[in-house]
């Protein structure tokens, strides 16, 4: 079996034709950030700006995400950020279950390479794909679950916060809870800039 490494991951994502999403994109968006980070953030899928630049969370939602991380003293460069699907769904629609399943192999390899201690699931799509297909984000956000030694928490997607400001206090509670979790796991100050 070929050794799994980042080079292989990058090549496989670039060459991937496992679902039709790649037919209408400008760039694949594998994810980026600190590959040694104990913290991984997983969103839904690339939008227009991400597709243009080949980078995850660089549009308005990404800017808000950067601010949310900064609010708990986490420099964005110290975490790893990616999406459930690596190609932009047309018109930013929610990726279909078969597209998510086709792309799962890439996310598995990515998670295996990073070996995160904590994963934050940004929005219902990521939470359904990785935690529980029946999850209701409004009810179950902020709840921690341990799976195979990895602590996972769903929270609102930053785009949802941009659409509905009334969700922001709950999202702030989740960010504080994330900070507490990192401290409890002894990952502070490793992951922080100071
Ligand atoms: N929304 C996502 O879920 N991911 C991105 O990369 C950008 C917007």
Image (cartoon, helix red, strand yellow):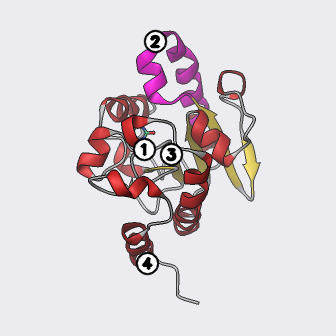
Sort mark 3 into few (<14), some (14-19) or many (20+) by Cα contacts within 10 Å: many
Residue 46, labelled with which disc? none
Sort mark 1 into few (<14), some (14-19) or many (20+) by Cα contacts within 10 Å: many
Q: Does any portion of residue 75 appear in the rendered image?
A: no
First in sequence: mark 4 or mark 3? 4
Residue receiving disc 3? 41
Which callout, 1 or 3, points to the residue nearer the camera?
1
Query: Residue 188 at x, y = what percent?
Result: 53, 46
Q: Quadrant of ligand 1?
A: top left
Q: Is mark 3 within 8 Å of ligand 1?
A: no
Give the overall secondary structure of the magenta segment.
helix
Label 4 vs label 1: CA separation?
A: 24 Å
**Relative to 65, is 19 above or below?**
below
Residue receiving disc 1? 89
Q: Is mark 4 within 8 Å of ligand 1?
A: no
* Mark 3: secondary structure: strand
Kindly identify the residue that appears in the image at 39 percent across and 77 percent down. Answer: 7
* Mark 2: secondary structure: helix
């Amino acid at each position: 079996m070929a050794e799994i490494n980042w080079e292989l991951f990058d090549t496989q994502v670039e060459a991937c034709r496992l679902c039709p999403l790649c037919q209408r994109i400008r760039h694949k968006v594998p994810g980026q950030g600190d590959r040694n980070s104990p913290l991984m953030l997983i969103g839904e899928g690339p939008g227009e700006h991400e597709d243009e630049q080949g980078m995850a969370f660089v549009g308005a939602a990404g800017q808000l995400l950067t601010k949310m991380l900064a609010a708990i003293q986490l420099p964005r460069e110290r975490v790893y950020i990616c999406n459930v699907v690596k190609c932009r769904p047309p018109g930013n629609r929610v990726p279909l279950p078969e597209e998510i399943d086709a792309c799962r192999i890439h996310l598995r390899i990515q998670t295996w390479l990073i070996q995160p201690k904590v994963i934050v699931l940004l929005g219902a799509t990521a939470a359904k794909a990785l935690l529980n297909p029946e999850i209701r984000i409004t009810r179950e956000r902020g709840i921690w679950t341990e799976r195979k030694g990895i602590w996972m928490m769903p929270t609102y997607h930053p785009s949802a916060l941009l659409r509905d400001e009334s969700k922001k206090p709950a999202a702030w509670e989740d960010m504080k809870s994330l900070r507490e979790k990192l401290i409890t796991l002894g990952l502070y100050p490793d992951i922080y800039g100071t």
